[in-house]
Image (tube, grey):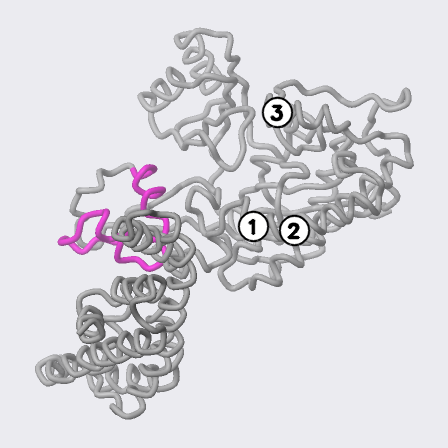
Amino acid sequence: MQLIWIALGTFLSEDLACIGAGVLVAQGKLHWFPATLACLIGIFAGDLLLYLAGRLASAPVLRRVDAGKLERAKAWLARRQMRAVLLSRFTPGMRLPTYVAAGVLRMPIARFAVALLGAAIAWTPLLVLGTAWAGERLVSRFVDQARGAVFVIAALWAVLWLLRQLTVIRKLRWEFWPAWAAYAPLLPYLLWLSVKHRSLTLFTAANPGIPGGGIAGESKSAILDQLSSDCVAPYEVIPASLNPFARIQLARKFLSERGLSYPVVLKPDVGERGDGVAIIRSAAELDDYLRKATGETLIQQYAGGLEFGLFYSRFPQEHKGRLWSITEKHFPSVTGDGARTLEQLIRDDRRAACLLDTYLARARRPASDVIASGERVLLVDVGSHCKGAIFLDGRRLHTPALEEALDRVSRTFPGFAFGRYDVRAESVDALQRGQFTVIELNGVSSEPTHIYDPAVSFWDAYRAMAHQWKTAWAIGAEHRRLGFQPTPIAGLVRLVLTRHRGYVLLQNGGRKLRPDPRPAGR
């Protein structure tokens, strides 16, 4: 009777039934083979019933579907049948729609049953025996077996839920990985570079003209000060020491003197990953931002057009640098249909749904607003990947004219040799001609952001990151030979922890950095 109840229990919850069977095995009340077999039979029967339900409901559904689309859907599922069934078995919420859809499309029942059986065989013993192995150790620690069983079921259910959430497409796609997860596999290589060059912080010498090489806490305005004003969007720093009224007046004075109109950009002078960046479109928004701002704030002319990320490096002995990463930045949007709310439109977009909370937090419309038919709502207007912008590999846009222009700009900044420019250009053609406006320059902590293109594989991304850090250490080694010393470990830790706001050209062996007098390309 226990086996029958276990098999029937899979109809209500396959996972709980398997976990319960595993606990009974751990307590010695069932042998592992019949317990696993009972779960397997119940799961297989339940999956077949879902297929048959779709098959019975297929007639009225298929009458409303275009025949061509139906054939394409059937061909797609036929080619990927086993992969689709296996993925649905390990992904929460996918089993019911997959199996019912297979029935609706009238997939051959024999082939589909084989796929179902294979997926069940792969999943069921893993869950039952895993529970038995863990349960035997956990239950033995409880005097009361009943309480122990409840504890094990609850704990394993929570662990199972968490592990299966990791199979959701958002967590598998490289572009959505958190920073700590992305860099963890790279740590052994970074340690090897440290050993090779006999310095943990040598990469900070890649940019001797920026504190810590630009790893953290650098002033955006101080970096822009070193570049030619011809290529930089006009900006002004609003000191943190001023009261809100004085800060607002200074911002308005800047706009008036420069003859600027809205929109403008406001952002912390010391900030990372797009935090605090806002496109200000009215005087009311400007006043509200500056009343709430705490640190020094940078106000900058809004540069229209398209946005790109350009990663550049140049060894000190070289006359010409290299542009080796170009990122096209796209700003996602949704289009209304007059029926769905903004939140529903985002949820129904396969990619946007992965960043639902991010988009709703930055939206200029309430989540409950029904968007009119044909109305386009921009989800994000800041070119930061972690804030929702879409990054695409733009290396195909590389031209000698663009690289030469970037090299010319870089030579105006003494002590800069490695990092990423964020620029705006009127068009792709203008960018390729070397006509762009610099809105920000980032040091060694920046990334070749083309790696976040969904089409860039995990391995290609890591190859690019490995090349990035190998180059940073190598340039740092060359600067060390010239007398520039890397930031000490204690200084680097203090810089990261305290978000140092100063900007001082580093003095090394009596040298002060000067612009390179040699013309680019000579």
Q: Is residue 388 left or right of residue 50?
A: right
Q: CA distance from mark 2 to mark 1?
A: 8 Å
The kind of secondary structure element at disc 2 is helix
Is residue 263 in sight in this rendering?
A: yes
Residue 109, x across and y down, in percent: 25, 90
On the image, the x and y values in percent for residue 401 come to 69, 52
Dot 3 crowding, Cα within 10 Å, few <14, some 14–19, many 20+: many
Residue extent of the magenta highlight: 334-363
**Pointer 2 residue:** 186
Quarter occupied by residue 265: top left
* Label 3 with label 2: CB-CB less than 8 Å: no
Q: Residue at x 40, y 68 (%)?
A: 129
- Image coordinates of residue 428 in percent, x first then y, are 54, 54
Image spot of residue 170 (x, y percent):
41, 56
**Is 516 inside the magenta-drawn segment?**
no
Q: Does residue 353 belong to the magenta stretch?
A: yes
User: Please, what is the three-letter code of the amino acid marked with disc 2?
Assistant: Leu
Question: Residue placed at 60% from the left, 21% from the top?
Answer: 498
Could you tell which of marks 1 and 3 lies nearer the N-terminus? 1
Amino acid residing under circle 1: Ala
Quarter of the image where one finds residue 54: bottom left
Kindly report the distance in space between the C-alpha atoms of the residues bearing marks 1 and 3: 26 Å
In front of the other: label 1 or label 3?
1
Tell me the residue that label 3 is attached to. 219
In the rendered view, does 321 fall on the left or right side of 365? right
Q: Is residue 73 above or below residue 353?
A: below
